[in-house]
Amino acid sequence: MVFQVLAFFGFGVIVFQDVTERMVYWVVFPMVGLFLGLAHWQHTTQEVFTIFTLVNIFFVTHLLFVSWLYTKYIKGMKYLGQSIGLGDLLFFYAIAFGFPTTTFILLFIAALLFSLILHTAIGVVKKQHTVPLAGYMSLFMMAAILLSHVNNAYPLYRY
């Protein structure tokens, strides 16, 4: 639980920095990944942790590769810096260490949908062209961690 609390505060730093400054110090991402990884490690064996982490990294890598192909060849845009920020990439890999694969994929997709809805709602009031994706997804992850502790019906490490 200590590692989840530390990850929770790391997510809070990401939310604050990404929403207010539109950039996050890179050192926060490895720290969040480490805390999430240690929390995940406590709930499983070394072999299972390794398999889940590798599958999650494989998933993120392939997702980013497909989005790079789409951005470069279909949209004709620069990928890093114009389509997605380095902090977003680091965030995706950081959370890949934190959860079993099924939980990770569900949280990842739900966090992306949450970010889309939140940015659309905020965009009605405030015209903002870029999305603080890591910040919005961190806010979602904070809610997921909090909900899992308040209500044990939603454990994050069940697989």
Image: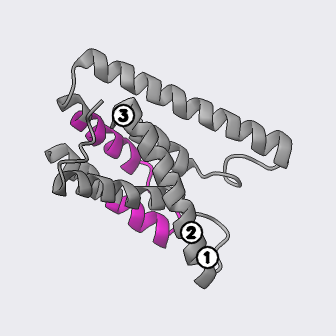
Type of the residue with mark 3:
Phe
The region drawn magenta spans: 12-39
Percent x, y for residue 61?
A: 57, 31
Contact flag, marks 3 and 2 (Cβ < 8 Å): no
Kindly give the residue lying farthest to the front in the view shown.
153
The image quarter containing residue 33 is top left
Q: Which residue has dot 2 on it?
A: 119
Q: Position of residue 154 (x, y in %)?
A: 25, 47
Q: Is residue 126 visible?
A: no
71 vs 142: above or below:
above
Residue at the disc numbered 1: 123
Write the residue at 30% across / 19% down. Answer: 48
14 is within the stretch colored magenta: yes
Type of the residue with mark 1? Gly
Query: Magenta segment, principal secondary structure?
Result: helix
Q: Is residue 112 above or below residue 55?
A: below
- For image coordinates 64% across by 74% down, the residue present is 128
Crowd around label 3: few <14 · some 14–19 · many ≥20 (10 Å): many
For the N terminus, the image quarter is: top left
Q: Nearer the viewer, residue 65 or 151?
A: 151
Name which residue lies at 40% across and 30% down. 101
- Give the SS element for disc 1: helix
Tell me if label 1 and label 2 are in contact, CB under 8 Å: yes
The alpha-carbon separation of the residues under discs 1 and 2 comes to: 6 Å
Determine the CA span between mark 3 and mark 2. Answer: 26 Å
In the rendered structure, find residue 97 and report the number of the disc placed on it. 3
